[in-house]
Amino acid sequence: MLKTNNCGELRVEHIGQEVTLAGWVNRRRNLGGLIFLDLRDRDGLTQVVANPEISDSAYATADSVRSEYVIQVEGTVQHRPAGTENPNLPTGEIEVLASHIKVLNTAKTPPILIHREEDEAEALRLKYRYLDLRRPRMQRNILIRHRAVKFIRDFLTSRAFLEIETPILFKSTPEGARDYLVPSRVHPGKFYALPQSPQQLKQLLMVAGFERYFQIARCFRDEDQRADRQPEFTQLDLEMSFVEREDILALTEELMIGMVNHACEKRIKATPFPRLTYAEAMERYGTDRPDLRYGLELVNLTSVAGRSEFRVFSEAVAAGQVVKGLRAPGCSNYSRKQLAEVEAVAKENGAKGLISLALEPDGTARSSVAKFFPDPLMVELLAAAEMEPDDLLLMAAGTPAEVNAALDGVRQEMAQRLGLISPDELAFGWVTDFPLFEWNEEENRWDPSHHLFTAPKEEDIPLLESDPGAVKSDQYDLVCNGNEVAGGSIRIHQRKLQEKVMELIGLSPQAARQQFGHLLEAFEYGTPPHGGIAPGIDRLVMLMAGERSIREVIAFPKSQSATELMANAPSEVEPRQLKELHIKLDLE
């Protein structure tokens, strides 16, 4: 080895020892007579001192090096002079007095700073990702990811799970997003698809009798990008046989608690994780992935507001729509400018407008719509919203989907303004009992809410014939801090029921056999009841690391436009490659 110790491990107990360090020059300071180098490796920083009275050659070399040079240092560990200790550095009590310094490699001036972060454009960071990854924050993020994945593997292995790899090249089947297609050279005109998830394969592993399977699985979806999406992403894929929903929820909850405690310093807000049905989540928070770190629950004001003389409310209720509100404590003094800013958030999320009502400290209701609420009705409204003096009520009217989306945005905005969001907390929660189907207006058919392999709740199976929209599924999502971090379900394991669901979503028997015949046939050979869940590794690590984008916890991510800026991918290929694949480009 070119070093005897890592740069982050030396302490006072090493004083007097001869050591050899190797790493990058993080910073160089010439203080007139002494040169100080902060030497960095993955483990941390150590201060190196070059003194010409101790070694002329070491001093001369130290004088020549610059930031990001790779060097080797031989020297003696000594205590820093009194008053120069750095309490913010684990190695801050010691330094290494250099007897020999060797330059292992020089470095050009980096296009981004390594020893401190500035507000560089993300495109620049991604172009020079290998430099960006040298930064302590990025190395910390990758370390958290490593710890999380290792914990997952150890945890599941100790509970009799087998890690089994499934193919990356598979059959193209409709699973919600566009497939990435891979042309076959040996089978002209035919294509593989990169898996959106190993869903069918893990179910087939249950048919195969493995009973407990997991995989740190790479998944691929050709969909529009955003902060928590990538063309390729990683999930923990997990499936179990002979289980009920409670078995999977209990195992996942234990896994999440252990992983967070092992991999990061965040604290979990509440255990056991609170549970909401899908209907409760939408009614109370306006979303099926609520941030449970704070309250600010929505209140349904339809029955009261519909009896007012305010036409926006009364006409909406008469049309079968809803009126809901959000109580913002202590905000009765909001200015017109502040109210306009909050209303803009509501409009960005689909609202036609936002009605405000302030309850003054003396109990007087102040609002442009107050005159439309007679005193007894105003008392009802304030009671329904649980208003206290000095509170602000923000109300919206429209379809349930419109109002929920708008007030979900307002809820997040007000939580920020009120300082209710703890950056150190992870608030996990379960959302259960989703609808099995959602109506597709454009296609005039039912779509699966989760995926077409999700089992309906047993008591709702008779409704598949008479009222598909009323069927609830045995689906469950794990949410954390306003993000869906895992989705799973009890699966269909009987061919007739699977074919019925396929029929309802518009797959003809011929299409079902063509696309899913391998799975349907497998269901005829003694398939056990089974279910599973797929936590998203990228999102979980993002939350544990306190980042806002999964790109910050992936070593080499794609940009917002799904391009790889460092190597410039996707790129054109040679004409001979296209010819081998029997492909002609039509870019018009």
Image (cartoon, rainbow, N blue to C red):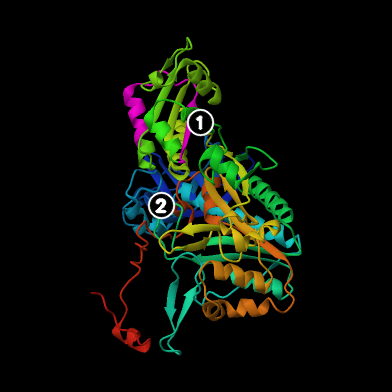
Is 521 placed left or right of 86 in the picture? right
Q: Position of residue 565 (x, y in %)?
A: 34, 62
Disc number placed over residue 393 in the picture, else none: none
The kind of residue on which mark 1 rests is Leu
Q: CA distance from mark 2 to mark 1?
A: 80 Å
Which residue is disc 2 drawn over?
Answer: 57
Secondary element at image label 1 = loop
Q: Position of residue 13 (x, y in %)?
A: 64, 41
The kind of residue on which mark 2 rests is Ser
Question: First in sequence: mark 2 or mark 1?
Answer: 2
The residue that appears at 44% across and 59% down in the rendered structure is: 230
Q: Position of residue 97 (x, y in %)?
A: 50, 44
Point out the frontmost of discs 2 and 1. 1
Query: Which quadrant of the view contains residue 106?
Result: bottom left
Question: Is residue 128 visible to the viewer in this orientation of the structure?
Answer: no
Give the residues in magenta.
320-344
**Which quadrant holds the C terminus?**
bottom left
Magenta region includes residue 295:
no
Is 305 placed left or right of 4 in the picture? left
Q: Position of residue 86 (x, y in %)?
A: 51, 34
Which residue is disc 1 drawn over?
Answer: 301
The residue that appears at 32% across and 72% down in the rendered structure is: 571
Secondary element at image label 2 = helix
Say few, some or many: other residues with alpha carbon within 10 Å of mark 2 (under 14 / 14 to 19 / 20 or more). some
Query: Which quadrant of the view contains residue 529?
Result: bottom right
The residue that appears at 61% across and 80% down in the rendered structure is: 518
Residue lying at the far top of the rendered structure: 362
Residue lying at the far left of the rendered structure: 588
Q: Are marks 2 and 1 in contact (CB under 8 Å)?
A: no
Asked if 376 appears above or below 450 in the picture, the reply is above
